[in-house]
Image (tube, rainbow, N blue to C red):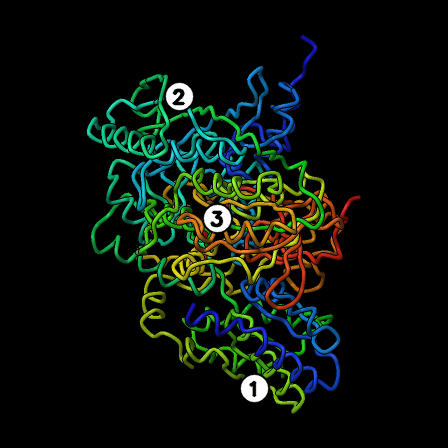
Amino acid sequence: MRYVDEYRDPRAARRLVAEIRRTATKPRQIMEVCGGQTHTLIRYGIDELLSGAVDLIHGPGCPVCVTPLEKIDRALAVASRPRVVFATFGDMVRVPGSDGDLLRAKARGADVRIVYSPTDALALAEKHPDREVVFFAVGFETTAPANAMSVWMADKKGIENFSILVSHVRVPPAIRIIMDDPYSQVQGFIAPGHVCSIMGYREYEELAREYDVPFVVAGFEPLDLLQGLLMLVELMEEDRAVTRNQYTRSVRPDGNPQAKKIMNEVFEICGMTWRGIGPIAESGLRLRDRFAHYDAERRFDVESVKAEEPAACIAGAVLQGKKKPHECEAFGKECTPEHPLGAPMVSTEGACSAYYAFRKFEDVDHGV
Amino acid sequence: MGFECPVPIQDYDTVTLAHGGGGKVTHRLIEQVLVPALDNPALRELHDGAVVRWEHGALAFSTDSYVINPPFFPGGDIGLLAVNGTVNDLAMCGARPRYLSLAFILEEGFLLKDLWRIVVSIREACQALELSVVTGDTKVVERGKGDGIFINTTGIGERLPGAEISPRKIAPGDKLLLSGPIAEHGIAIMSVREGLKFETDLESDTVALWPLVEAMLNRAGRQIHALRDATRGGVASVLNEMATAGGVGVVLDESAVPVNESVKGGCELLGLDPLYVANEGRFVAFVAADAAEEVLAVMREHPLGRESCLVGEVVAEHARVVRLRSRFGGSRVLDMMSGEQLPRIC
C-alpha cells in the first residue's frame, strides 16, 4: 500500500538498525512516550534488533491505560442510566472498573455503542432526541480537538441531549513527572507524533532545555521510529539537548492552529489523576464554564463516585517506564487480554498488551 | 441430577459479545460448557460440521445461525450468507451439499419486501449449487426482541468417497494453502456499520466454496488432510484451532499472506489486524507436501481460487502453537483472538 509499505521495508530497516548500532558508542536509555509507538516497536521486534545499543523504556502514552479508575466507574454509572446511549471508542469497553467493564454493562442492558468519532456520537444525539447521548471523551491532545468540536457543534446547533464525559490528559506534564523522578534512567525521548501534529513541538523544546535531554518527534511506522531513534542517538552522541522532527510529513513546529483554537475555546487545563501514576498538576483538560452543561459528570451527578486503585497490578510502574510488562508476576498468568488486571493489558496501545500479543516465540511454554 | 454447570467461565456472570466473537472466550464456552454436557465422538472433533456414518456411507451435517447486521451489505445479504456459510461448513468436511433446512426468526416490523429480497437470494444461491431447501420454520418475535432478521440453516451433505478430511490427519511436513486474499468480508461489513462508516470499494467475499473443494478433492483425494474456512476470528484463529485439534505446530509466513490494498487501508484506519478479520469465502487447506504444488495449481485454475497461495507449513515442534514468521525476520506467537477485535481510539 502506498505511503505505508514504504515505511515497513525490511531492507531499509536493517540499514537503519546497523547505523544506529554504529553510531551509539554506549547503550542509550530512550523512552518512546506514545503507546502506539510501543506497539510498533514490539510488533516488529525493533526492541530486540537494537538490544545492547538502545534500551527502550515504554512511556505513559496510552490514553486508555491512564484513564483513572474513578472515570471508568463514573462512565459505568452514566452508561447504566435508563435513557442513556453511551458512545465510546472501541478500546474503552473492556477496561476494568471497580465492578466490571462497559462490555459487561452492555450485557446487563446498558446501551453502549462503539463509535469511531465524537461527531458520530453527536449524530446519534440528533437522531434520537428522546435519548441522552454521552460520549466518553478520552485521549491525549490528539483526540481533544475533535471532542471539542463535537461540543462546539452541539452548542451551535442547540443539541441539548448530548454531553461528554471528559478524561483528557496532556503529555508534557507527564514527561516532567518522569524527569523529576530522581531514579529516572531516561536519557532521551521519542516524542509522540500524533500529539505533536496537533500541538507542534515548542513545548518539547522547552522540556529539552529544562531537563537537558534531547527529543525527536517521530511517527508510528517501523522506519519512522528507526529514523527517529537514529536522530536521537546522534544528538546524544553530540551531547545536544535539542528537539528535532522526524515526522515532517505530519508535524509542523506550531502544530495545527485551527485544532488548537477549537480545543482552547472549549477546554481549559486542569489537574488530573493518571491511573497507576497518581495526580499530576496541569495534566488534564476540562470543559470551560461556558460549556459546563455539556459535562456528563455534572449532568448525571456522578461526581460523588469515588474509587481506589487495587494494589495487585504494577501498571503504574509500567506506565512510568520503571518496569517492563513481563517483569510483572501476573503477566500472562492471572493477567491476560481476556482477563486483564490492569488497563495496559486491554488497550491495543498498552505496553502489557503489546508484550502479550507479540510475545517472542522463545518466551512461550510450547507444551509437548 | 448430579451434573453441575461449570459456569462461571472466567468471571463472566452474563453472556458478553466476546462469547460469540470466535476467539478464546467462545472456545472456553464450547469446551467448558457445551462439550462436557453433550460429549460424543462426532462432537469432540469440534469441526464446523460433523461427519456421521450410517449404513450407506458417510454424511456430513452442519448448522449455523446468521445474525449479521446490517442484513444487506456490499457483496451480498444475510440470505446468501446463510446458504454459503452452511454449504462451506459441509465443503470443509469434503461433502457435496444436498439438503438444507431454513429457519427464520423475524422481528415484528421487518419489511416484507426485504424478506422477499432475502428469499430470492437464498433461492439463487441454492440453484447455483443444485441444492434444495427441504424444510423450514418461521417465528416472529415482538418489536425490540430481535434485530430484524435472524436465520438458521442446517445442511446435509454427501461426503465424496475419496475424501478423508480431519484435523487429526494433519501431519508435520504438510503445506498450508490459502484460497485468496483475506479479511474482505469483515472490513466490507465494518465499512457499513453504524458508527464506523467509511467509504471503500470493498465487497464481502461470501461465496460457496464447494465447486473449488470438489476440484481439489477430485485431483488429490486423501492427500488433502484438512480444510477450514476462515470465518469468525479470521485466519489466525482457525489456524490455532487446527494446530490444537491436530496436535501439531503451524508456521505462517506473514509476507506470503495476500491482503488487498483496500483491506490494508481499512485495517490501518480501524486499527485491525487482517489475520483476525472474518472471511466468508476463504479457507486454509493442509495438504501432504508432495501433493501441495499440484493442489495449488488446481486451486489457481479454478475461478474461486485464482489468488491461492502457499502460506506456511506444519512442523513437529511447538505443538498446538502457531508461529508467525514476520516480515522483519523475527518469529512470534500468533495467538487466537481474545474477544472481538475492537476499533482503536487514535
Q: Nearer the observer, disc 2 or disc 1? A: 2
Seen in the image, is A213 located left or right of residue A6?
Answer: right
User: Which quadrant of the figure contains the C terminus of chain B?
Assistant: bottom left
Q: How crowded is mark 1: few (under 14 residues within 10 Å), some or many (20 or more)?
A: many
- Residue B277 tag number: 3
User: Which quadrant of the figure contains the N terminus of chain B?
Assistant: top right
Where is residue B41? Give x, y as percent.
Answer: 66, 22
Where is residue A183? Give x, y as percent.
Answer: 73, 70
> What's under tag 2, amino acid-wise?
Ser
Instruction: Tell me what residue is drawn at x 66 percent, y 44 percent.
Output: A310
**Circles 1 and 3 in contact, beta carbons < 8 Å:** no
Seen in the image, is B14 located left or right of residue A326?
Answer: left
Where is residue B167? Give x, y as percent.
Answer: 64, 37
Which quadrant holds residue B312? Answer: bottom right
- Residue A242 tag number: 1
On the same chain, marks 2 and 1? The answer is no
Q: Residues within 10 Å of mark 2 (few under 14, many from 20)?
A: some
Which quadrant holds residue B155? Answer: top left
Q: How crowded is mark 3: few (under 14 residues within 10 Å), some or many (20 or more)?
A: many
> What's under tag 3, amino acid-wise?
Val
Give whichever of B30, A131 is nearer the camera: B30
Where is residue B235? Give x, y as percent.
Answer: 54, 47
Instruction: Tell me what residue is drawn at x 34 percent, y 61 percent.
Output: A266
Q: Nearer the observer, disc 3 or disc 2? A: 2
Q: Is residue B271 above or below residue B51?
A: below
| Distance from Cα at disc 1 to Cα at disc 3 | 43 Å
> What's under tag 1, amino acid-wise?
Val
